[in-house]
Amino acid sequence: MAINEEQRQLEIAAEVEELARALAHSTRDVPHPRDSYRLLGELGATIDHLAQVIDQLGKWHSRTEDGTHYDGEDGDGTGSARAAADELTTAANMLRLASSHVHRAHGHNGVVRWYQEPQES
């Protein structure tokens, strides 16, 4: 069961980034082919959670108010909390699309009779 960790958001985001970087460096090969099924399942769930995080951050940005949550904006008018909300909504939708593809790949992977170890040719 997940617990609310509002006070650790930055720490958790840094941990997720560090672990994702380590995974990115380790998946050039899959030494145990059977693990690919579970790996895809875990990644699909992770993308689902990231989509939720990004969607929630987008909704939070859309609820923020000048004078309450921030003191105006810097720059040449090209950025705003509203623009950030719009981009985050788009990103969340793209993550949901990516998740759908990963979940379908997971299903396709599930019918392959993988060896535990690669066989010598």
Image: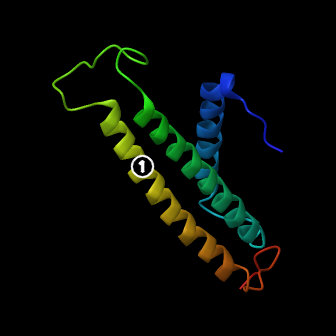
In the depicted structure, whether residue 31 falls above or below residue 83: below
65 or 121: nearer the viewer: 65
The residue under the point 67% across, 79% down is: 107
35 or 121: nearer the viewer: 35
Determine whether, in the image, residue 26 is placed left or right of residue 77: right
Q: Residue 67: x, y in percent?
A: 36, 14
Name the image quarter holding the N terminus.
Answer: top right
- How is the protein colored in the picture? rainbow
The residue under the point 60% across, 76% down is: 104
In the depicted structure, whether residue 84 falls above or below residue 65: below
Does residue 6 show up? yes
28 or 98: nearer the viewer: 98
Determine whether, in the image, residue 85 is placed left or right of residue 47: left
Name the image quarter holding the C terminus.
Answer: bottom right
Q: Amino acid at mark 1?
A: Thr
Q: Residue 120: x, y in percent?
A: 75, 81
In the depicted structure, whether residue 9 falls above or below residue 18: above
Does residue 25 show up? no
Q: Residue 11: x, y in percent?
A: 64, 26
Reading the image, the residue beneath label 1 is 89
List the single residue furthest toward the left. Answer: 76
Tell me the SS state at disc 1: helix
51 or 64: nearer the viewer: 64
Q: Residue 66: x, y in percent?
A: 34, 20
Decide: few, some or many residues near mark 1? Use Cα within 10 Å; few <14, some 14-19, many ≥20: many
The picture quadrant where one finds residue 36 is: bottom right
